[in-house]
Image: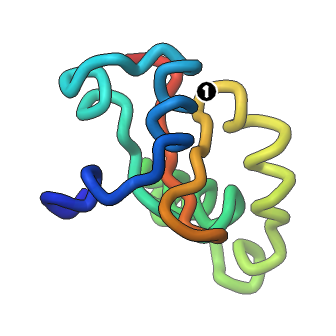
Amino acid sequence: MQEGLIDAMPDRFFNELVDNGIETVEQFEDAYAGDYSSGADFAEQLCDDCGYLSESNLPTWISGCIDWDLVWNSALRHDYFMVEGKYPGDLRFFSCHF
């Protein structure tokens, strides 16, 4: 996260972090997983970062048919949570395991 950006977040952002157990800078740094426009975007990027898309040589005509919203809702939302940032659609993702 860009330096100083955290200071510009609304109070509800910090309240949601505390509600999810993030109370220190160290916990924030350990849990922060990036900012994305949706759970689907986060799911696709996480799967790509983990090598699931490239290691299997999955053709784009198959990977383009994956329902990334379903991946987020059925598999990843139990291990990650999102908090809306400064404006609608500014979603910050955090690991539940920090």
Q: Nearer the viewer, residue 65 or 29?
A: 29
Q: Nearer the viewer, residue 29 or 13?
A: 13
Q: Residue at x 65, y 83 (%)?
A: 60
Q: What is the total number of numbered labels drawn onto the structure image?
A: 1
Q: Residue at x 55, y 20 (%)?
A: 20
Q: Nearer the viewer, residue 29 or 56?
A: 29
Identity of the residue furthest to the left in this view = 3
- Would residue 52 be seen by someone viewing this image from the given angle? no
Q: Quadrant of residue 40?
A: bottom right
Seen in the picture, residue 89 relative to 85 is either above or below; the reply is below
- Describe the element under mark 1 as helix, strand or loop: loop
- Residue 83 position, x and y percent, is 58, 45
- Would residue 21 be seen by someone viewing this image from the given angle? yes
Q: Residue at x 40, y 20 (%)?
A: 22
Q: Residue at x 61, y 26 (%)?
A: 79
- Residue 45 position, x and y percent, is 51, 62
Seen in the picture, residue 64 relative to 74 is either above or below; the reply is below
- Residue 91 position, x and y percent, is 56, 59
Q: Quadrant of residue 62?
A: bottom right
Q: Is residue 3 left or right of residue 57?
A: left
Identity of the residue furthest to the bottom in this view = 61
Q: Residues within 10 Å of mark 1 (few under 14, many from 20)?
A: few
Q: Is residue 83 left or right of residue 3?
A: right
Seen in the picture, residue 54 relative to 83 is either above or below; the reply is below
Q: Amino acid at mark 1?
A: Asp
Identity of the residue furthest to the front in this view = 11
Q: Nearer the viewer, residue 29 or 86?
A: 86
Q: Quadrant of residue 82?
A: top right
Which of the image's four quarters has the N terminus? bottom left
Residue hosting label 1: 79
